[in-house]
Amino acid sequence: MKKDILLSSRLGESCIRIDHDSGLRICLYPMKGFSSAFAIFGTRYGSVDTTFKTNEDADYVTVPEGIAHYLEHKLFEGEECSAFENFSKTGAYSNAFTSFDTTAYHFTCSDHFGENLRTLLDFVQNPYFTEENIKKEQGIIAQEIKIYLDDPGWRVFFNGLCSVYYNNPVRIDIAGTVESIAMINKELLYRCYNTFYNLNNMTLAIAGNFDPDEALKICDEILIPSKDIELKTIIPDEPYEVKEKRVSQKLYCALPLFQLGFKMPNLTGKECSRQYLTWNIMLDSALGSFSPFYSRCYESGLINDTFSAGVFKGRGFFLPLISGDSRDPDKVTEEIIKELYRLKNDGIPKEDFETVKKMTYGDFIGSFNNVGTVAKGMMNADFNDMDIFENLEMTADVTYDNIMSTLASMDIENNSLSVIEPLDRE
């Protein structure tokens, strides 16, 4: 077992990173003065991972869309009782989530930490699937999918992804489709579980009020060693240009919703994190609430406080997005593009950059006061081959020249607009 102590001179804090003999990466961040602990057990497995192979496969395997989310739903269910029931006995709060590139299970508690950690490690490592409980879940998830089909915020987002990407599976709803989940069976669930829930593909992160020695002792007792199966996943190649310049749909909503996406090549690892910070600071400096653009458009009534600009990123995708509500989405788009071209020529005001950078840095500092944010931050950093302190250093290192170079490289015309227009009520 390899154990490293990671230090932050800026924070005067440290955390522990362990390569456990089982194959699992364990990140521990004891936080003095806190009353609760938060533990998260995650795998590099999300909705985009529909095509994969291991060293035991002759060729790549493709599985139905939505299976990662389906698996998350079923894993809480044990042979005798659900993991939720075991957590509730100790007063712990537990939950899980599936994103485009991650599935994770977590709990927070003020006492009985050891008992709760045992529950977490036990149920994630011991799946229980039957044809009966799988069939039951299909109806539940199908209803969930249908509900989101009528959600304006959800549709403007996914319609936008579909208009940007030709092939990338990020364009498919995390839950899949009613048709795709109907193809899921017990054998497929076990196949995906045994592939992606290998401990060499996972991270356990714990932060807050807990004893690291107790946590490691429990890990030593419960973790079932995994051999590295050399997992590989495929994200299909993408054309450089967006698929469609504009898409629209009518749904019940008070105001039109819009999302403007700028297609970018995929980035990975630390470079993805570095560019994510730089792009967010650039977009916030150029178009955010401190910018002349925002003040002008807000005062004219063209935008409101739902307006936001930032980067949507993950394993296999990196997409600057600008979104919000507006009575005239096409006019907003026109003004955004005009402003970006102007700033390319005239430059972003340095004082706006300094303000946004200080706020971004301050937000990172503040995030270390929340046990859940710290634990999730350690897991996400580890999934990007980083440690939790590196984002802080990267933020401190962003310069004005960096954001102006980023803006200069931006292909402003390679964009796609998604709009949800109000449906008249009769």
Image (cartoon, rainbow, N blue to C red):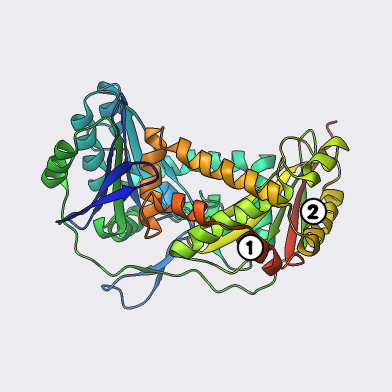
In the image, residue 300 above or below residue 268: above
In the image, residue 302 above or below residue 417: above
Q: Nearer the viewer, mark 1 or mark 2?
A: 1
Q: Quadrant of the N terminus?
A: bottom left
Q: Residue at x 72, y 68 (%)?
A: 411
Say whether disc 1 or disc 2 marks the residue closer to the N-terminus: 2
Position of residue 402 in the picture relative to residue 113 (left or right):
right
Q: At label 2, which amino acid type do we have? A: Ile
The residue indicated by pointer 2 is 336
Task: For residue 184, say whether it is visible.
Answer: yes
Q: Position of residue 382 (x, y in %)?
A: 35, 54
**What count of labels does the image hold?**
2
Viewer-proximal residue, 158 or 182? 158
The residue indicated by pointer 1 is 401
In the image, residue 1 above or below residue 15: below
Position of residue 324 in the picture relative to residue 31 (left or right):
right
Viewer-proximal residue, 213 or 186? 213
| Mark 2 residue element | helix
Position of residue 181 in the picture relative to residue 200 (left or right):
right
